[in-house]
Amino acid sequence: MSEGNCFKAEPLELRLRALASNIRELAEERRGDSLALLALLRLLESLHQEIRDSLFQDSLPDNRQALYNLLRDIETSGGWPYIHRMKLQNLLANFQFLHDGEKSSMPPSFSQNNDLP
């Protein structure tokens, strides 16, 4: 049995749990390293987009019954997967702008643009 067939024989749920565990472990190892964690989030977002735009779209149902089953599963199993991006305003809420009563040297145009992903 080839390695590829061995993986297919293993239930999807078990493989997903193992993958999630590995990602959590990697993230935990990088606790406190915002650049490494940002790289991990970027990779996850990129994978999400890659799978959605190619493999998932190619696998969409081609008849009403299969489409109905897919939509029913989406509705009953937690909705559509979405990668939420932090708003810049939320990110900056953790940053202290005032130090010893003085205003931050951050340019006003930067702090006003809170709609960035």
Image: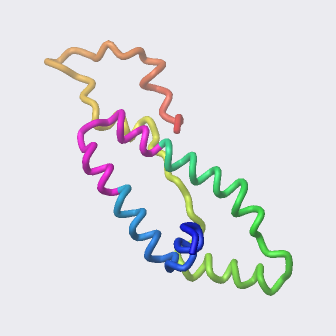
What residue is drawn where x is 41% and y is 36%? 89
Foreground residue among 100 and 6: 6
Foreground residue among 50 and 88: 50
Placement of 113 over or under 60, stated as above or below: above
Q: Residue furthest left?
A: 100
Q: Position of residue 107 (x, y in %)?
A: 41, 14
Q: Quadrant of the N terminus?
A: bottom right
Count all numbered tags in the image, as a single digit. 0
Q: Residue furthest front?
A: 1
Foreground residue among 2 and 98: 2
For residue 40: magenta? yes
For residue 54: magenta? no
Q: Position of residue 43 (x, y in %)?
A: 50, 44
What residue is drawn where x is 18% and y is 20%? 99
Q: Residue furthest right?
A: 63
- What's the image's color scheme? rainbow
Q: Position of residue 79 (x, y in %)?
A: 57, 71
Placement of 44 over or under 56, stated as above or below: above
Along the horizontal axis of the image, is 103 left or right of 88?
Answer: left
Q: Position of residue 51 (x, y in %)?
A: 64, 56
Along the horizontal axis of the image, is 88 left or right of 37?
Answer: right
Region rendered in magenta: 24-41
| Magenta stretch, overall SS | helix
Placement of 117 over or under 26, stated as above or below: above
What residue is drawn where x is 57% and y is 46%? 46
What residue is drawn where x is 54% and y is 67%? 3
Along the horizontal axis of the image, is 92 left or right of 73?
Answer: left
